[in-house]
Each structure stands twice: as C-alpha cells, then as structure tokens.
C-alpha cells in the first residue's frame, strides 16, 4: 500500500508540473495576474509531492519492503542503515527520482529567493522549470518507475547494494553532483525566460549570476568528491581517468565556468548577451547528454546503469526537443540580442572572450572523445574502439595552460580598454619571477630538471603572483593595507579565492602526475619493500568480520629514513550476499604527499600481491576544488546583488512608467 | 572598413583560428590514441599486426588462470568459445576478475600471445560489458554460419 502512495504522489507531481509549465507561462505573456500568481504555490506543491515520493521510497528501503522491485535489486536486510537510506540513489530508477526531487528543490529555492524580481519573470522561470520537471516525471512514470512491484512472488531478501557503493563517498558524491548538475537548469530557465520576455538586459544577468555561481560551486564539489572517492575506493591510485561517464560532468563544469565568466561580462558591460544565452542552453543540454550517456546503457563504465533502449530513446527525444526548441526561440529572438562591440582589442572583455573560447573548445574536444566510440560503433555496424586518456590529456593540458596565461592578464586588465604598456608594467615582474622560480623551485627540491614540472610551477606562480599584484594595485591608494583589504568587494575576494583554487588544482594535478611513484610486488609476511625514502614492512594479514562482509586485514609498518612513522591497514573484503570482492585501500594522507597501499590477492604460499604508491601533492587537487567552490560561495554572498536588486527594481519601475514599450513588447510565442 | 566592423572581423578571425587549431589538434590526438577492439577469433585469423595497441575481450576460460608464485606474472586464456587467446599480464588483477567471467584487456599481440598492459573487469557483476558481449555475439554468428557447411571450428 505504501509504495502505491509514492506512485500516486509521483503522478500528482507530474500533473502539477504540467500545470506549472503552462498556465504561468501563458499568464506571463497575456498579463494574466492570477495565472502568474499560480507559479509559486504550484512550485511548492511539486516540491511537497516529490518529497513525499522520495520519502516513501526511503521508507520502503528502511522497512526492507522487497516487494518493491527497486528495493529488492539494491538493498538487503543486512545492509547497514545509512546505505539502506542512500541506496535510494543506488540505481537508475531511484537516482532519477532523487535527481527530479533536486530539481524541485532548486525550483522552490527560486520561488523563495526571488522576491526582488518581477512576478512575471519569476513565473516564466518557474514555468520553464515546470516543463523540465514534467519531462523528468513522465520519463519515470513511463520507463523507470521506482515503485514497480514484484507481486505476488516477492523475494525474501534483496540482492544487496553493489559492494563498491557501500562507502561514505556514495553518501555524499551523488547528492552534490546531482545538485550541481541540476542547478544549471535554473540558469537555463532564466535564459529561456529572458528570451520569452525579451528582456535580455544586465538585470537578467545579475539575477542569474548568484544561481550560476551556486550551481557551479556545488558541481565543483560534486566532481571533486567523485574524484576523491574513486581515488580511495577504486584502488588504482588515480584521481581522474577520463572515463566516458566522468566526462559529461567535466564538460558541464567547463561550460559552467565559461558561463559564469560570460555572465560577468553581460552584467557589467551589457555585451556577449547572445553568447551567454547560448552557453546557458549548452550547459543544460550537456547535463541532459550526461543523463543520456549514463542511463542509456551505451557504455561500459563504473557509473553505467543497466541498459534499456527505451530510456535512451526517451532521453534523446527530450534532449532534441529541449535543444531544438531553445535554439528556435534563440533564433527568433536574435534581433533582440544586439550587443555593441564597445571594447578595444586589449581589454578585459577580450581576455574573457579568450577564456570562453578555450573552455568551450576544451569541452567540445572532450565531447568528441567521449562520443566518438559510440558514433563509430553505430556507423561501422558494431565495430568497437576506445579513446584513451592520452587523447584527453593531449588536448586538455595545453588548453588549460593557455587559459592560465589569459587568467592573470584578464583579471588585472580593465574593462573596455587596457594599454599594453600598463599590462607590461604591472605583470612584467610577475612574469619574470614566475619563470625564474618555476625553473629553480623544482630543481632545488628534487635535484633534477623536469620540463613539465617547471612549466606547471611557472603557470601556478603566474596565477598566484598575479593575484598578489592585482590586490596590491587595488589597495595602493588606500590609507593602510588593512583598510585597503577591507575595502575590497566581496565578489572580488570570491573571484580571487576561486582563482587561487584553480592554481592549486593546476599545481596539484601536474605535480602529482609527474612525481608519483608506484611499485607492484609480491610479499611474504616479514618482507619489506622500499619506495622513495620510505620502507614498507609487511607484517601479515588477519581475518576480519564485518556486518555484511568477511575479509583479510593486512598490517604494514611504514618507516621513513629508518624512523618509524605509523601502521597502515589495507583490507580485502568479500561481501557475503553478492559474493563480490572489494579492496579497501590504506592511505596516509598528507599536505605534501599521500602514501597509498592496495592489496591484490594471496598466493598459495601465503604471499600477497600489492601495489604501493607515493603521490606527492595529490591533496592539492581537492583542496583547489574546495577553494574554487568557496570562492564562488563568497561571491554569491556579496551584498551588492541584493542591494542592486532593490535599486534596479525602483529604477525599472520608473522606466516602465516613462516608456512602456520596453517591457510590454508583444510576445509571439 | 569601419572600425567596429574591423573589430568584429578581428574577433571572428580570432575564433576561427582558435577553432581550427583545436580541431586539427583534436583529430591528430584522436588518431594517435584510438584503441581498436578485437575478438580472439579475429586475432586467430591474423587481423592484428604485432605490436599494435589494441583492446581484446572475451571470457576467462575456466581453469586457465595460472599465477606465478615468485612474481606478479599471471597468465590466462580469454575465449569467445570459437578461439582461445593466451593472455600474459604483470600486475594486480581487478577485484571482479574471475574465471568464467568477462574480461577486457589493453595491450598488444606478440607471437600469437597477448601481452596485456591493463586488465579491466566490469563493475557490475550482473552486467556483461559491451565489448565482451560483442565478441561473444560475433563468434556465435560465425559458428552459426559455419555449421551448415559441415565444418566445426570450435576450439
């Protein structure tokens, strides 16, 4: 009975989404106040019913209701309670419900934090999101109902959650990734609402910016958590594999990064309007494409859900409808988006344009590498091939290098026009210092020259010293350093934190790729192996027993230059229900380096195969992501947005009374 | 030319140059890092040049896994039930590697033996990887085509 309640609320939320996707939109274009006013209550209704749906599914998991097919496939009576709850997103159907619920959460947030925007604009935004919600809920009802039952012969016990997912990372990675992903549909809805209403002005850009920043910050954290989880759970010592399902979030992230920069230009200077709209559409389309790639069963991957062609066709159809419809609307509205090219060849606008081109090219190249095998398979009649990490690195690394060159130039130059002499004066010393230190620092620490490490250090320092110089310029005419620092705008501080985070990732990713070492060996108890300046003494294994697994736990004594450091305990587990083995890494995490041990399998003699890694700077990758997200959050909190909103509203109200044609332009769709 | 036109043109040229460089670079990189996929039957038929980087897929033959007691060296047979392929690997096999299960490996053929540089196993034990399934289907089709002619090329 209870699962049917979930089914019912799911259908109700679909109905509400359909109403939300029609009446407020029609109301906004005909000026029907009543219908416009429906947007917020309907949004609340969608959120409430989807929350109920999700709660019912959670309840079915917690109460071990194995008559629900999805629960039977992804849970087990012995599963620890935290995984029973989170198993809600452990498979296709439940995770899609969770994803749709996230959308309704963002919708509710828009409904609440949009008091300063005109009601008709909010109605349009929520209406567009309602349409998206209708598409998602219909998809669930038609092809992937999480509440399907196995009756009358319900299984006695469930098949258990995939053992690789029974980990803390599984509790936090999917929610944050989904939340970030789905957040870009808010920016998309803002862009479509702006196209519909014809008000593509800097107010629209200013309203969009906090949402874009928030979604981007959460997506950044979501991707970083996925990388961190893969690093300690999958046990191959890597943190990024260019896996076909890692790529769509990365594409989305790159487009999102382009978008937040382009929105800045649109807000401040009123240019790049059509480009910003296009980016918002692309970022949303990329999130749908990611959904298609993971859920159509086209791929073999860590993340792939079991295959079902009808789902793929539905998502592809929805993607075609959304992108086609948006681009059609975009084309119809193109005359509205005339921007003045009011800037010189050397100006912040141009550097940000370069930033956007590089980011879009990078995401296109990643998309090419991700889709190529699928397209090839379809065209060649089933022949298979794969595109490996070398392709992605070869494209991505140089592009990011060029991006970094523009980064410091862009943030130090001025809007509209900057003289080359000014840039040379402000950044000349920074450039020289970066190059010198870039050569010297790695040499001093490692005693040998490494070209890649030098370039990476130069680029990292170029950003960091550029930030220092930029702040120095800004506070140079203030009475004291402290009062100068206090006078900096919150959003400016946020930007610099995020840029510092980017430098940290750049350094971490490059240096860990260059300086990591690993060794695979077969050891008997009592034998030791040395790697770098460390010694690892294998002291043997002992059996361990968990709630739903049995395993072997090894003990290693770690010595550095013959001084005892600590013990490490990697494990090898077998989950009793599914019989699937799982390796638990032992990691000694540190700011400068990680030590990392993974167990292979035992030989008849009692010896174990194992791999030992030393990974310098690997923590910097995630530290950088945290800084970037923090920077974006700081920027969102800038009081300027809220204050300006009120001011703009007053000014626009005044404008409206003066020349009513600006906002009351007839809307043809 | 009017100044703003020239500016527009400069920007378009800028974008066009960037794009063409990127496309060229992408295609070059792509041509260098594509791993084609082959089945044991195709390798037995000599379709692969020695030393070419490829991917193979098949089932790990029951009882074929031999692990060295002194090193990480391991050998096993990947089969599509029409032909067998001897695979050598120095390293640690993934958690889900098992006899009778699908396996995908990267590496190259040398003297009829596949030297793997990386062995992958699917993450979900209920789901056969696209590659292994393709290999099995292809071999099945071959056998179906061959049997009516009164031949059997089973291994």
Image (spheres, coloured by chain):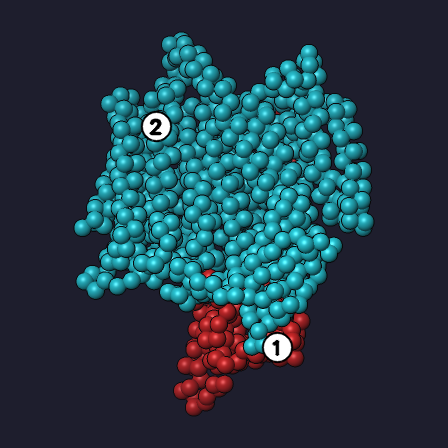
Chain colours: A cyan, B red
Quadrant holding the N terminus of chain B: top right
A237 or A537: nearer the eye? A537
Q: Residue furthest bottom?
A: B150
Task: Tell me where residue A581 appears, x and y as whole percent.
Answer: 47, 65
Secondary structure type for disc 2: helix
Q: Is residue A519 left or right of residue A546?
A: right
Task: Tell me where residue A31 appears, x and y as whole percent.
Answer: 29, 21
Circle 2 sits on which residue?
A111
**Quarter residue A42 falls in:** top left
Name the residue: 71% across, 26% down.
A469
Name the residue: 43% across, 55% down.
A166
Q: Chain of mark 1?
A: B
Name the residue: 71% across, 39% down.
A459
Q: Residue furthest front?
A: A564
Mark 1 vs mark 2, CA separation in Å: 65 Å
Name the residue: 43% across, 77% down.
B141
Q: In the rendered image, is residue B58 in sight?
A: yes
**Do residues under tags 1 and 2 come within 8 Å of each other at their CB atoms?**
no
Disc number for residue B68: 1
Task: Tell me where residue A239 appears, x and y as whole percent.
Answer: 58, 51
* Residue A517, placed above or below residue A551: above
Circle 1: is it few (<14), some (14-19), or many (20+) Cα within 10 Å? Answer: few
**Quarter residue A492 falls in:** top right
Q: Judge depth for marks 1 and 2 and give the one in front.
A: 1
Q: In the rendered image, is residue B19 in sight?
A: no
Q: Chain of mark 2?
A: A
């Amino acid at each position: 009975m209870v699962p049917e309640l979930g089914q019912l609320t799911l259908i109700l939320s679909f109905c509400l989404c359909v109403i939300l996707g029609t009446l407020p939109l029609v109301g906004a274009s005909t000026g029907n106040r009543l219908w416009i006013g429906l947007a917020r209550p309907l949004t609340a209704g969608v959120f409430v019913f989807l929350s109920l749906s999700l709660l019912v599914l959670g309840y079915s998991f917690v109460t071990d209701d194995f008559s629900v097919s999805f629960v039977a496939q992804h849970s087990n009576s012995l599963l620890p309670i935290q995984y029973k709850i989170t198993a809600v997103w452990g498979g296709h159907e439940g995770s899609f419900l969770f994803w749709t619920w996230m959308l309704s959460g963002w919708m509710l947030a828009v409904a609440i934090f949009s008091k300063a925007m005109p009601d008709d604009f909010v109605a349009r935004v929520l209406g567009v999101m309602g349409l998206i919600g209708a598409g998602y809920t219909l998809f669930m009802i038609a092809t992937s109902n999480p509440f399907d039952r196995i009756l009358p012969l319900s299984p006695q016990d469930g098949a258990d959650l995939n053992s690789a997912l029974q980990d803390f990372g599984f509790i936090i990675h999917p929610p944050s990734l989904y939340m970030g992903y789905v957040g870009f549909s808010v920016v998309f809805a803002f862009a479509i609402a702006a196209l519909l209403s014809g008000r593509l002005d800097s107010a629209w850009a200013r309203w969009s910016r906090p949402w874009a920043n928030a979604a981007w910050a959460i997506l950044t954290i979501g991707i970083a958590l996925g990388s961190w989880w893969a690093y300690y759970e999958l046990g191959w010592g890597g943190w990024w594999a260019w896996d076909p399902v890692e790529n769509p979030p990365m594409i989305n992230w790159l487009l999102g990064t382009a978008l937040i920069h382009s929105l800045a230009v649109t807000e401040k200077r009123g240019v790049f309007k059509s480009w910003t709209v296009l980016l918002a559409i692309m970022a949303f389309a990329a999130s749908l494409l990611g959904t298609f790639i993971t859920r159509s069963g086209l791929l073999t991957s860590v993340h792939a859900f079991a295959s079902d062609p009808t789902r793929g066709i539905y998502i592809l159809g929805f993607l075609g409808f959304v992108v086609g419809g948006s681009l059609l609307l975009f084309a119809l509205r193109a005359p509205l988006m005339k921007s003045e090219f009011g800037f010189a060849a050397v100006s912040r606008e141009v550097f940000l344009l370069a930033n956007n081109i590089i980011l879009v090219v990078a995401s296109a190249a990643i998309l090419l590498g991700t889709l190529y095998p699928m397209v090839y398979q379809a065209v060649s009649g089933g022949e298979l091939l794969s595109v490996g990490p070398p392709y992605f690195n070869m494209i991505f690394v140089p592009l990011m290098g060029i991006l970094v060159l523009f980064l410091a130039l862009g943030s130090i130059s001025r809007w509209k026009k900057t003289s080359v002499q000014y840039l040379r004066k402000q950044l000349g010393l920074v450039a020289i210092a970066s190059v010198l230190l870039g050569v010297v620092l790695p040499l001093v620490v490692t005693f040998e020259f490494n070209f890649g490490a030098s370039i990476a250090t130069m680029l990292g320092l170029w950003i960091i010293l550029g930030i220092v110089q930029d702040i120095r310029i800004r506070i140079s005419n203030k009475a004291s350093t402290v009062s100068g620092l206090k006078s900096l705008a919150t959003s400016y501080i946020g930007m610099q934190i995020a840029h510092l985070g980017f430098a940290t990732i750049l350094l971490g990713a490059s240096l860990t790729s260059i300086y990591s070492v690993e060794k695979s060996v077969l050891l008997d108890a009592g034998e030791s192996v040395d790697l770098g300046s460390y010694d690892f003494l294998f002291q043997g294994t002992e059996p361990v027993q968990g709630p739903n697994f049995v395993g072997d736990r090894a003990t290693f004594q770690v010595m550095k230059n013959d001084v005892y450091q600590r013990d490490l305990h990697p494990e090898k587990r077998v989950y009793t229900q599914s019989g699937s083995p799982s390796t638990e890494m032992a990691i000694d995490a540190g700011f400068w380096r990680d030590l990392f041990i993974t167990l292979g399998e035992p030989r008849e003699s009692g010896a174990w195969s194992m791999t030992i890694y030393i990974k310098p700077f690997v923590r910097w990758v995630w530290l950088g992501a945290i800084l970037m997200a923090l920077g974006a959050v700081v920027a969102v909190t800038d009081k300027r947005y809220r204050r300006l909103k009120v001011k703009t509203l007053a000014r626009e109200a005044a404008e409206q009374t003066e020349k009513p044609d600006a906002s009351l332009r007839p809307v043809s769709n | 030319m009017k100044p703003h036109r020239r500016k527009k043109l400069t920007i378009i040229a800028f974008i066009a140059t960037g794009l063409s460089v990127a496309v060229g670079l992408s295609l070059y990189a792509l041509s260098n890092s594509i791993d084609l996929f082959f089945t044991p039957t195709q390798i037995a038929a000599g379709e692969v040049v020695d030393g070419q980087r490829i991917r193979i897929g098949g089932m790990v033959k029951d009882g074929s896994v031999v692990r060295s007691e002194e090193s990480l060296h391991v050998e096993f047979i990947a089969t599509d039930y029409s032909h067998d392929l001897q695979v050598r690997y120095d390293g640690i096999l993934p958690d889900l590697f098992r006899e009778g299960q699908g396996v995908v490996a990267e590496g190259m053929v040398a003297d009829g033996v596949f030297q793997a540089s990386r062995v992958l196993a699917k993450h979900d034990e209920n789901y056969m990887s696209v590659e292994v399934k393709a290999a099995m289907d292809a071999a099945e089709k071959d056998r179906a085509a061959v049997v009516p002619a009164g031949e059997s090329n089973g291994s």
